[in-house]
Image (cartoon, rainbow, N blue to C red):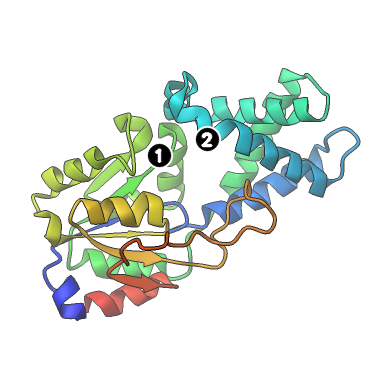
């Protein structure tokens, strides 16, 4: 069955955040260090984290349907500062300057904490020795380019498609069609590896690609409710071609 599913693969595309690197882990560490160093008035760190998460859930789901989206695509700091401003407003403090300081501290702490998952570079080098590879990642142009450079990933990929640079991202089918044109491969000859069913697996399936779903217990964003669990597959939705808990398992699938 694995030969049938992956034997025709000619190109492999990867998601970045929480597939190759622990973005949510870095965000959680960065937020905690920020609120420990710069406490919100009258709040402990745990309560500050809850207020930030509540502000995120109110603001960020609307970004793509508002004028904020163009700003978000270009620079991560703009919406990061707005989110901190809204967090401060939740605790009764209208202080844009403080919000900017918090946003800058959080950005620096998150960047310092970001790291590849164990074995990632070895996997990419081995896969890349046999298949051309691409990266498809959502997020602001500056933040994503910064991550890719910091993690030393740029030389490993023939194609890097970033939402902030294109003006659209996953699950928009245009990004998958663009990857097909760039790679010169038919849909069934491309494998996509990602951690999100909604943003990675399902749209890649809809494009006719092979899919590997990377599922880790840590894959819960800092904005989630404290009782939240990692993303699951909607009832009745099609399965990925394979599910793995560690990127190193990909080598067995493609052997």
Q: Badge 1 local density, few (<14 within 10 Å), some, or many (20+)?
A: some
Q: Quarter holding the N terminus?
A: bottom left
* Residue nearest the viewer, comparing 205 with 152: 205
Indicate whether 98 appears above or below 132.
above
Q: Quadrant of residue 34?
A: top right
Residue 148, image x, y percentages = 40, 47
Q: Is residue 134 visible?
A: no
Residue 157, image x, y percentages = 26, 52
Residue 39: assigned label: none
Q: Are marks 2 and 1 in contact (CB under 8 Å)?
A: no
Q: Which residue is mark 1?
A: 145
* Residue nearest the viewer, comparing 81 with 209: 209
Q: Look at 82% across and 30% down and name the residue there.
A: 91
Q: In the image, is 41 to the left or to the right of 183?
A: right
Q: Is residue 11 visible?
A: yes
* Residue nearest the viewer, comparing 204 with 43: 204
Q: Which residue is mark 2?
A: 61
Q: In the image, is 219 to the left or to the right of 56?
A: left
Q: CA distance from mark 2 to mark 1?
A: 23 Å
Residue 8, image x, y percentages = 11, 69
Label 2 element class: helix
């Amino acid at each position: 069955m694995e030969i049938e599913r992956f034997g025709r693969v000619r190109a492999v595309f990867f998601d970045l955040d929480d597939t190759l690197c622990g973005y949510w882990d870095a965000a959680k560490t960065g937020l905690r260090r920020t609120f420990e160093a710069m406490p919100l008035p009258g709040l402990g760190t745990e309560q500050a984290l809850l207020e930030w998460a509540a502000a995120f859930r109110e603001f960020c789901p609307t970004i793509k349907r508002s004028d904020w989206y163009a700003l978000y695509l270009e620079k991560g700091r703009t919406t990061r500062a707005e989110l901190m401003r809204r967090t401060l407003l939740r605790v009764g403090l209208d202080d844009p300057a403080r919000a900017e300081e918090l946003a800058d501290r959080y950005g620096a702490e998150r960047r310092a904490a970001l790291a590849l998952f164990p074995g990632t570079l070895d996997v990419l080098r081995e896969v890349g020795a046999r298949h051309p590879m691409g990266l498809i990642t959502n997020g602001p142009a500056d933040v994503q380019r910064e991550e890719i450079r910091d993690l030393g990933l740029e030389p490993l990929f023939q194609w890097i498609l970033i939402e902030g640079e294109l003006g659209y991202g996953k699950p928009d089918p245009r990004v998958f069609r663009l990857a097909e044109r760039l790679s010169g491969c038919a849909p069934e000859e491309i494998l996509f590896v990602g951690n999100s069913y909604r943003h990675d697996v399902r749209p890649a399936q809809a494009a006719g690609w092979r899919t590997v779903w990377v599922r880790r217990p840590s894959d819960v964003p800092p904005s989630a409710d404290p009782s939240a669990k990692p993303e699951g597959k909607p009832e009745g939705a099609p399965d990925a071609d394979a599910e793995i808990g560690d990127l190193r398992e990909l080598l067995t699938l493609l052997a």
